[in-house]
Image (cartoon, rainbow, N blue to C red):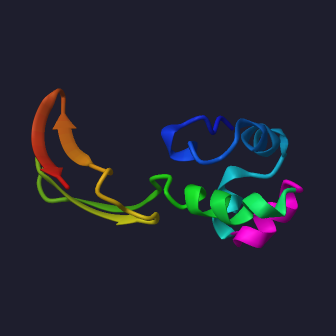
Amino acid sequence: MNLSASIYKSIPNSIIRRIEKTTFSWDRFFDLAGEQIGELINFSKQGKNIHKSVHRVPRLELKGHVQTITRTVIKLELKISVDFRFDESNCFFCVLKNEGKILCQGQQ
């Protein structure tokens, strides 16, 4: 796992290297409390800081359903749920394309 992103500016490089050396799955960090993360990397003082940073990583849950209407028309329902701390510096674009043509787009 490569954690070197602007989200982690507040975490020292030595701590990032410790996290990268663990065999612990990245997804499992989202389920841990700050104290548990501190114990995992043997640096309890950084646990809360790492916990905050982990929950700033954009993480989306997608649920979709496709239904055929006619031979050339389908109905697509897509639910996008965010699972991270959103702040003003985050900006997202959603674009739906079909063979290079933009069918729908949104911005938040």
Residue 86: x, y in percent? 37, 62
Q: Which residues are magenta?
A: 32-42
Residue 48 belongs to the span the image colors magenta: no
Q: Nearer the viewer, residue 77 or 53?
A: 53
Q: Nearer the viewer, residue 60 or 85?
A: 85
Q: How many marks?
A: 0
> Residue drawn 23% across and 47% down?
94
Left of 39 or right of it: where is 37?
left
Is 70 placed above or below 95 here? below
Q: Nearer the viewer, residue 73 or 3?
A: 3
**Prevailing SS of the magenta stretch:** helix
> Residue drawn 10% across and 42% down?
103
Is 17 placed above or below 36 here? above
Name, please, the residue furthest toward the right: 42
Residue 75: x, y in percent? 17, 59
Is 34 placed above or below 14 here? below
> Residue drawn 73% across and 63% down?
47
Residue 105: x, y in percent? 13, 46
Residue 38 belongs to the span the image colors magenta: yes
Residue 5: x, y in percent? 54, 37
> Residue drawn 80% across and 69% down?
36
- Can you tell which quarter of the image residue 77 is in? bottom left
